[in-house]
Amino acid sequence: MSNERLTVVGGGLVGSAIAYGAARRGISVRVLDQGDTAFRASRGNFGLIWVSSKGGGMMRYARWTRDAARLWPELHEELLALTGVDTGLQQTGGFWLGFSEKEVQARAELLEKIDKGAGGIPYRMMEPAELRQYLPGLGPAVVGGSFGAHDGQVNPLMLLRALHAGLKKRGAEIISGVDVVDVRHQADSGQFSILSRDGQRWSSDRLVLAAGLGIPALAEKVGLYAPVITTRGQVLITERLKPFLHYPTNKARQTREGSVQIGSTSEDVGFDDRTTTDKIEWLAHRAVATFPALKAARLVRAWGALRPLTLDGYPIYQRSESCPGAFVAICHSGVTLAAAHAFVIGPWMAGLTQPPPDFEVFRSDRFLDPNASFSHDH
Amino acid sequence: MTTDSLFRLSNLAEGATVTIDFEGQAMEVPEGISVAAALLACGARDFRSSVVGDQPRAPYCMMGVCFECLVEIDGVPARQSCLIPVRGGMCIKRQSGAPALDIEDEGEGHE
């Protein structure tokens, strides 16, 4: 068993899942968490476990997402048994709903491409009459949809709480309210030195940077190029309602407690996590077009949250060549990928296992090609 | 449904009153106060049952934040009784769990 200490910078869903995955394998783990003053994507997440349509431009990502969803029940059961915290996992399959024949056609082509390319991501296109068998109350604006059997939902707040509780149970140290401003690699000792804004210092054998939007400035200090952009997602929450929506959809989902979550926008507005009247209105219109009965529901909250994203929307998982023992993990889907981060990425970044096969595609070198241009689906 | 009130209205003797109905019981209450205040003053303690645990609930914050005081008013479910002034003839019922949507309503323009 290794006596090495691993320090994870970032205590959101990505950092906590990786840290948990190392701690459950016996590694001595420390998590440095900025806390809820951070642009905490984990707190604004829509809560979908979503495989359908992911990875159209990178089949390795489609397979990674598919495999991550398959690992979810094991993570849920383990955290429940260890901590008593229920993540609320429901893997019933989920629906994408389209408002035009054109987008339904594009959807069918994308899902076929992904299922052929990655394998094992079955889907089913449905006409409105068939959709209504699963989603009663669907409005006339919906002209078609798709069903993905691997899709599902969780409560992201409970997931974060379960991971933090699980870390403590596994003996990890979580230090909150820490704004890490510098990381250094001491070439002679091989140790990393970590400094916070308020002058605290830590030393560590290994370092994982999983601080979302805070990553780029820290990554370059340990020889890692990690460009990050943001998207803002605005979400509406209704009062609690009797259960009527038994499957998650891309436009709304009903939580186990009864609230309907309506989402979400995807806006490129920099570091601005406010809500705006025009987007709230657009979301409400779209939700009522999808499920007309929602017009009688009262909204109790709206929020905006920033989520980190790379230029092509796919993750960066990478180890530093110049500073051995340093790693970076950036992704947009901290919920969907949580179990893979715990069971696969955690042991790898802790030095216990090799990286998964064909993982070079997730290196950030892909952004260094001066002739490449990037776009993402978010 | 009601019992001895834990609350006393300081100005009960003054001013106009209106009559409201809570679960079939007529109550004469001062004009202008909130539904929640009126019901509490008349001894109501069980305003609603909770959504997940089906437990009795009563107002907590009295300022529109906690959503514990939900009742049905004149047929409209889940209204925040601490934010709504009493009106003569109001028919108020306990809110039982979460309100249900009428999902058979498929919207305008659907033939």
Image (spheres, coloured by chain):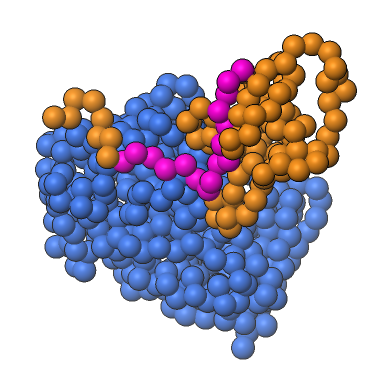
Examine the rendering and report whether any part of residue A235 can be seen. yes
Residue sitting at the far top? B15
> Where residue A77 sits in the image (x, y, percent)?
49, 75
Identity of the residue drawn at 43% across and 34% down: A297
Q: Quadrant of the N terminus of chain B?
A: top right
Number of numbered tags placed on the structure image = 0
Residue sitting at the far bottom? A1
Examine the rendering and report whether any part of residue A359 can be seen. no
For residue A253, side relative to residue B8 (left or right)? left
Colour that chain B carries in the picture: orange
Identity of the residue drawn at 57% across and 32% down: B92
Which is nearer the eye, A322 or A117?
A117
Q: Which residues are magenta?
A: B88-103
The stretch drawn in magenta includes residue B92: yes
> Where residue A91 sits in the image (x, y, percent)?
36, 64
Q: Name the quadrant containing residue A360.
A: bottom left
Picture layout, residue A314 above or below residue A323? above
Identity of the residue drawn at 38% across and 67% down: A68
For residue B77, side relative to residue A262 (left or right)? right
